[in-house]
Amino acid sequence: MSLNFKAISEDAPGPKWRRQFLEYWPAYSAWWAREGLSGRPTYHECRQALCTHMPEIVDLYDELCALVGGGDVEARFLSFYCPPRYLAGCSQAIWQGDTPLLVRNYDYDEDAFDAVILKTRWNGRGVIGTTDGLFGLVDGINDAGLTASLTFGGRQEVGTGFGVPLILRYILQTCTTTEEAGEILKRVPCHMSYNVTVLDSARRYLTAYLTPDRPTILTRAAVATNHQERVEWSSHARFTATVERERFLLQRLTLHPETQEKFVGAFLKPPLYSTAFSSGFGTLYTAAYRPKARALEIHWPGRTWSKSFDAFEENQVRVTFPSPARQVY
């Protein structure tokens, strides 16, 4: 199995972003409509939700919708409002040294992955991140050095709210500190349970437990895998080894002080690195975000791809993954 990762830079919404969106649209439109379009909110409901909860990016949303033709289904999709349910794996942690460093593994289905690192200056705010749906982000950093990343929260409940990738985009478009991000995470509704870890250049951090059916909890947890305060979906927890991965990371943070390089390297080996590609939970990349340097590195075993606001080359890398294997825990 192999994937082609692209690095794209475009300050304002334009032809590069549009070309990528149109390339991915057939797959995304099928996913959006898989439960029937009548099961998704109307365009009016989607835009009204954005006006209510994320007013600062409504003009940007309108611009992106117009860029892809202003179609009804495209606009509903780009709102990320009440999307179909989806699951991911993922592990993330804050290094315990003095320098702010957030490291994460993204464990997901390669067929539902953009594989795009996008650098933008939308609304005058520089953002670099790994896209989802070309508008949302599964992790990213802005030009103030604020970084954010997500993991699935391990609960089956689905409610009324936004897909979490758009919440990450909104945070990085509008916030400069962890405190500001925490306020957004408390007030913007999320349609499923996710864990969002935020770190700023002053090494202030939090992990928010987002849920569709109860208030958001802001914690000082430095580690997030695929459950929240306790395991609530036992079969998913066993399949993804969420508890084992959390324990492993906590031990590394508390019992084994180590260099940044060794900490990043631990994400490239079991039990954090997953080869369950055939089950849709293989590790597609490891990201190391460095807020003070306003930079990130994308890692794979034996390979590193570096990007920053000061040095961002538009290029592509093809990554070959280990032979798919079904993991049993």
Image: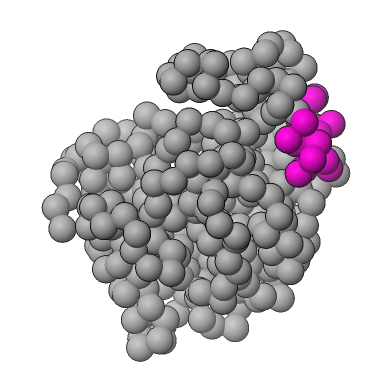
Identify which residue is drawn at 83% across, 42% down.
56
Q: Quadrant of residue 51?
A: top right
Find residue 42 and report its image quarter: top right
Where is residue 269 drawn, in percent x and y?
28, 62
- x%, y% of residue 140? 61, 51
- Give the percent coordinates (x, y) of residue 264: 42, 67
Residue positioned 44% across, 64% down in the render: 228
124 or 68: which is nearer to us? 68
**Is the magenta region chiefly helix, strand or loop?**
helix
Answer above or below: position of 46 versus 223.
Answer: above
Q: In this rendering, does residue 57 appear at all?
A: no
Judge whether 123 appears above or below 71 on screen: below
Which of the pair 216/20 is nearer the observer?
Answer: 216
Quarter location, residue 230: bottom left
Placement of 83 over or under 94, stated as above or below: above
Relative to 69, 73 lies left or right: left
Magenta stretch contains residue 111: no
The quarter of the rendered structure image containing the N terminus is top left
The colour mode here is one colour
**Can the viewer see residue 120 in this picture?**
yes
Query: Relative to 264, is 12 on the left or the right?
Result: right
Question: How many numbered discs, if any?
Answer: 0
Horizontally, residue 95 falls left or right of residue 178, namely left
In which quadrant of the rendered image does the C terminus lie? bottom left
Q: Which residues are magenta?
A: 48-64
